[in-house]
Image (cartoon, rainbow, N blue to C red):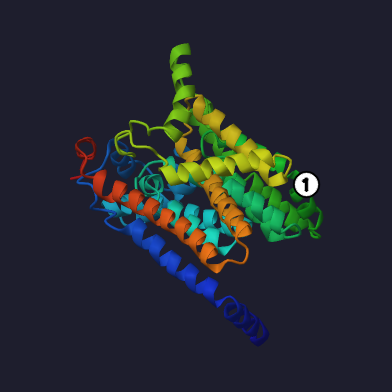
Amino acid sequence: MLIVMNKLKKIYVDNLLVFNVAALALVFLFSIMLYKLGSLTAGYSATEYKTATSTLGFNGFFYHIFYLPLEAIRSILFFIFKDHGYTITRLPNVMIGSLTVIIYSWIIYNWHGKRTAFLSFLLFTCSAWTLHVSRLASYDVMYAFTGIALIGLYVMLKKYKTSYLALLLNAFAISMIITVPGMIWLAITTMILTREEIKINWNHINKLWKKMLVIFVWFSSVPLIVYSIFKYGGFIKFVGLPEHFAGVIQTIKNIVGVPVHLFVRGPQLPEIWLAQAAILDMFVLIACLVGILFYVTHKEASRSRFLLIISLVSLLLVMIGGPVSISLLIPLLYVYAATGIAYLSREWLVTFPVNPFARTLGVSLISIAVGLSCIYGIRSYFVAWPHNQITTSTFVYKIK
C-alpha cells in the first residue's frame, strides 16, 4: 500500500500543473452547468413537462428502454427527490452533458496536447449549443454524448491495446449507446473500424470468465431492447428511421437543411436555440473548416478515416429526418475545430520557431479569439435566449 501511495504521490508531483488546471476546469464546468439551472426560465417547456411527469423507475425501463443511461439517472434522482422541481428535472442532463465535455477534453488532450485541450475545453463548454442540450430536460444531450463517446472509445482502444478494462468499458459503452435510437449504426461502424484493436485486446484476455463477462456486458441491453420493441413497438425508431415518410419535397428540405443549420443559421427550435442565430460563430466555423480540410488531405491516416466515416454516417442519420438529433453532429464539429486550432498554432510556431514575440503573439491571438467566442456563447445562452419573447412563451408549463 505504501508503495502504491508513493507512486501516486510521484505522479501527482510530476503533473502538478496539469492536475491543478484540470481541477479548476472542473470547477468552472460544474459552475456554469449549474448556474441558474432551475430559474433561468419561468417554467417547463412541453418536452420538459413530459419528462417531469413521465413514468420512470425499474418498471419504467421496459417502456422507456430508449435513452437508457439518461432514463436510469432520471429514475434514481426522481425516486430520491419525489417532489422534484426544475433543478432536479434538468440535473440528469447536466450530468450527461458534463461527462460529454470531459470526454471531449480527454480526446483533444490525447490528440493535440495540453494547450489545445484547455482552449478547446473552454470553447466547447461555453458553446451555446452545449449549454442548451446539457441544461434542458430533453434527449438531445444523449446524441451529443454518443458522438463524443464513440470517438473516446476509438482513442481508448488505440491507447490501451492490451487492456482488459478498456475492452470491458468499450463493451459497456456500446451496450448503452445502442439504446439511443439510430445509434446502432454508429456503434456497428465504430466496432468495424476498431476491429483490429478489439481483436488485440480480446487475444490478451487469458481467463475464460473475463471473456464471458465482456460478452455478457456487450449484449446486456439487447434483451431489454428486444422485449421493449415486441411489447410496445418502436423498431422504426430504434433503427433511426422516421415514423412516416415525409414526401420527396420535405425529404429534400431535410437534407439541404442540415448543412444550412450547421454552417449558416440555426434551426427554429425556441426551446433549444435562439431564433435563427448561427450555431457556430465565425472563429469556430473557420477553425472547423480548417480541421475538416486537414483530415480530408490526410484521409489515409487511421484517425482521419475514423472521424470522416463517423461524421458521414452521423450526417446521413440526421438528414433522413428520423429521431436522430442534429446535436449528434455539433460535438463532432468542435472536434474538427480543435484540430483546426492545433494546426493553426503549429503552423504559426513553425513559421516563427525562435522569435519569442511572434510566438507569444500567435498564441495570444488564438486565446483572445477563444475568449471572445466563449463570451458570445455565454451571453447568447444566459442573456439573449431566456429574454427572447418566443422563449418565454415556450417555457410556460408548471407542475402544481
171 to the left or right of 269: right
Question: Where does residue 382 sit, x and y in percent of width and height?
Answer: 28, 50
Q: Is residue 344 visible?
A: yes
**Which residue is painted at 56% across and 37% down in the image?**
183
* Residue furthest out toward the bottom: 2
Quarter of the figure with residue 80: bottom left
Query: In this view of the protein, which residue sits in the foreground, 75 or 138?
Result: 138
Q: Is residue 67 visible?
A: no
365 to the left or right of 135: right
Q: Is residue 386 above or below residue 372?
A: above
Question: Where does residue 136 sit, x and y in percent of width and height?
Answer: 34, 45
Identify residue for label 1: 196
Question: Where does residue 377 sit, x and y in percent of width and height?
Answer: 35, 49
58 to the left or right of 291: left
Query: In this view of the protein, which residue sits in the foreground, 90 or 359?
Result: 359
Q: Quadrant of the C terminus?
A: top left
Question: Where does residue 46 sit, x and y in percent of width and height?
Answer: 28, 36
- Disc 1, SS: helix
Q: Is residue 390 above or below residue 3?
A: above
**Which residue is painted at 54% across and 77% down in the image?**
16
Quarter of the figure with residue 9: bottom right
Residue type, numbered disc 1: Glu
* Residue furthest out toward the top: 248
**Which residue is painted at 46% across and 29% down in the image?**
258
Q: Quadrant of the N terminus?
A: bottom right
**Which residue is painted at 58% across and 81% down in the image?**
13
